[in-house]
Amino acid sequence: MMLAWEGCLNGRDVGGLPSSDGRTIRFGALLRSDSHSRLTAGGIAAVRAAGISRIVDLRWARETVLEPSPFAEDPVYRNEPLIGELAEQGTTMPDAYRTMLDTNQRRIADVFVRLGDAPSGPLAVHCSAGRDRTGVLVALALSVASVPPASIAADYARTDGCSGDTILRMLNHLDNRHGGARAYLLTGGATGAQLERVRNRLLS
């Protein structure tokens, strides 16, 4: 479901996606978008009206200085860079996602568990374009919630300029090199209980 956040190009609720055990992602559990720095006054008001309990800004600190979030002073806001600033240099799509995973495992796992630690209520995650860093984190969350790869790819492909094949290649890499999303996050430092908190938070 697309979000009526004026100024966001890729804002949507991932609710309604099916899990392999017959459950679904709850509407209002996980919202994804591009940067909030371009929101209009009406868009800012719409985000506040959504009752979001945690905004996770995945951008680098220097990006937040150049394009500050309008919520930077709000208690719900956290700047949690998902990857190191040099992690993707010299790579091309879809190799960039594999490099992102392989070189930032502990950092990504640390950001992931913060989704489960947030106060109850909707989670909103974003980066700059709402595509790469956001796409990787959302794909991990949906994988932990047992959403099939084809459904994860279909959601990713709704982002402007994105192909579902990119995220499928990333998920295949997770399986082949790391044993899947759960094993990847556990090796990165997350606990089983932390993964279950995220899973239970997302599923209806």
Image (cartoon, rainbow, N blue to C red):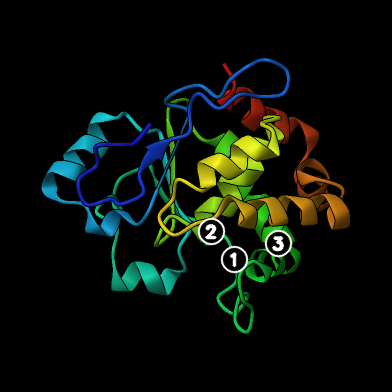
Disc 3: which residue = 101
Q: Dot 1: within a 10 Å radius of its alpha carbon, few (fewer than 14), some, or many (20 or more) residues?
A: many
Q: Residue at x 15, y 51 (%)?
A: 40
* Residue 51 vs residue 87, the one in the foreground: 87
Kind of residue sitting beneath label 1: Ile
Kind of residue sitting beneath label 3: Leu
Q: Residue at x 36, y 66 (%)?
A: 64
**Residue 188 visible here:** no
Q: The residue tagged with tag 3: helix, strand or loop?
A: helix
Q: The residue tagged with tag 2: helix, strand or loop?
A: helix
* Residue 54 vs residue 97, the one in the foreground: 97
Can you tell which quarter of the image residue 85 is in? bottom right
Disc 2: which residue = 133
* Residue 2 vs residue 183, the one in the foreground: 2
Q: Earlier along the polypeptide chain: callout 3 or callout 2? A: 3
Q: In the rendered structure, are the residues bearing label 1 and label 3 in contact, judged by CB atoms less than 8 Å apart?
A: no
Disc 1: which residue = 83
Q: For the view shown, which residue lies furthest in the bottom direction?
A: 90
Can you tell which quarter of the image residue 128 is in? bottom left
Q: Residue at x 83, y 45 (%)?
A: 183
Q: Quadrant of the C terminus?
A: top right
Q: Seen in the image, is 33 located left or right of residue 109? A: left
Q: In the rendered structure, are the residues bearing label 2 and label 1 in contact, judged by CB atoms less than 8 Å apart?
A: yes
* Residue 90 vs residue 44, the one in the foreground: 90
The percent position of residue 47, horizontal first and vertical second, equals: 26, 38
Q: Earlier along the polypeptide chain: callout 1 or callout 3? A: 1
The percent position of residue 65, horizontal first and vertical second, equals: 32, 71
Q: CA distance from mark 1 to mark 3?
A: 9 Å
The percent position of residue 148, horizontal first and vertical second, equals: 69, 33
Q: Seen in the image, is 100 located left or right of residue 201? A: right
Kind of residue sitting beneath label 2: Arg
